[in-house]
Image (spheres, rainbow, N blue to C red):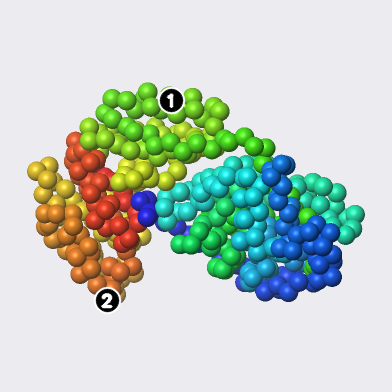
Amino acid sequence: MARLLPLLCLCAGACLGEATTAPMEWTPVQTDAIARWKAENKAPDGVVASASERSVRFLVEATGCAASSTVEFAAIGPLSDRAYESLFVTVASPAALAAAFDRAGVPRGRPADVSRARLWPEGEKVALSVRSWGSDTLAPTNLAAVLKDLRPEEGPALGIPAAWTAGARDASGAPVASTNIPCAVFALYNHAPSLLQLDGLFDQSSTYGRFQAARTFRPGELFELTATWDGRTRVKDVVARISATNAVETMKALQTTAKDHEVHAALAFDGTVSVAQAAQVAGAFALLDGPSLRMNGAADGQFFFRAFLPETSWRQREGRIFQPFEVHVAADGAKTFVFCEEDWSGEGVDPVLKPKSTPFSDWAELPGLISKTGEQGEKVNVMFLFAPKSCPVSTLTPVLAATAGRIGTFYVFGD
């Protein structure tokens, strides 16, 4: 369940005006050669796993991307309809690939998922090599030989090991990528179902257009991709439990751990921490958020740490892009729910704001109050909480359970 998302989340779509030589849905081209590879490798699913080498080797076909083609996926599964924006299509299904990584002993990680405030992909790193099969076009090398990074100044991407997250799973434990479009095996942006991920923050909107095919590929051109794990477990999940007095000590301990591990941390404030103190601590941890110490997700029953770092300008209703739900907690504990209706019936370019306040006593009343906001309220899944700076954070956390499944984003303002 999401605890925090950025206030604005922009999604990039495919550029309709961009010409493409690749089809949408994919039909295997070199069926005879694929059958020969499977026979030679005794791999009827199109993938070979080696537990002794901790490696997975699998066959892919090039979609025929031109050198100028924007690429959003390094590889997709055979049932995908996104060949037009993908470099390769795997012969093996995402389910077969995921099972091969299990057999090779590569630990499963956790995918980036903005709906759960997990902005960083989490997984042990695998070195990827790619080589031509059936020709001498490409000797073994890495992804940088087949993909072009148009913005390398933004940080390393293609020439470094990728994160094996194993992708989002359904209720049965099967990879979502096996059945759900785009059937991503390796998305070049943070995409929860994707089995492999670039190691870093690559949200779809800002990443779109960054990667292109390094050259024009023939449709059906065959390549082998090999992923190898060195066997060293680097990823470490940590819940940093913060009191009113231990923030500095806890921060130093995490920094020490991050020297030898890739730390994925979430903050948990105890009953001694006030709203004002939480904002100070969150600001300090925001400065540390980076490749070694990654602030990722929310602890159970806690806000994502950036909930305590809202923009001051968001206090003014007139300047907001949209009107979130509001809850105001007074110094005496009295609570008020505010729904700010937007009336667009006038002649101006901006709506007339009509805030409606309803006192309530128990957090469990919130779902009912939200349901009464009608059609306009149905589109809102963000809530602003206003409370005295001295208010304990624990006074506000019951809102999470009360609105679970309905509200995904929270911001806390100290008054």
Judged left or right of residue 193, residue 310 is left
Task: Find disc 2 in the rendering and name its residue.
Answer: 345
Residue 377: give x, y in percent of width and height: 28, 67
Mark 1 neighbour density, 10 Å: few (under 14) some (14–19) many (20 or more): few
Measured in 3D between alpha carbons, the distance from the residue under mark 1 to the one under mark 2, in whole angstroms, is 56 Å
- The kind of secondary structure element at disc 1 is helix
Point out which mark residue 390 bears. none
Q: Position of residue 360 (x, y in %)?
A: 12, 57
Q: Locate residue 209 relative to residue 63 in the image: left or right.
A: left
Look at the image and tell me in which quarter the C terminus lies: top left
* Amino acid tagged 1: Ala
Give how far across and how far down residue 181 sits, in percent.
57, 68
Which residue is at the front of the view, 337 or 184? Answer: 184
Residue 315 in the image: above or below residue 96 = above
Residue under pointer 1: 253
Across and down, in percent, residue 264 comes to 47, 39
- Kind of element beneath mark 2: loop
Work out whether residue 284 or residue 354 is closer to the camera in this orientation and state it: 284
Q: Residue at x 78, y 55 (%)?
A: 224
In which quadrant of the rendered view does residue 366 lie? Answer: bottom left
Corner quadrant of residue 137: bottom right
Name the amino acid type tagged 2: Ser
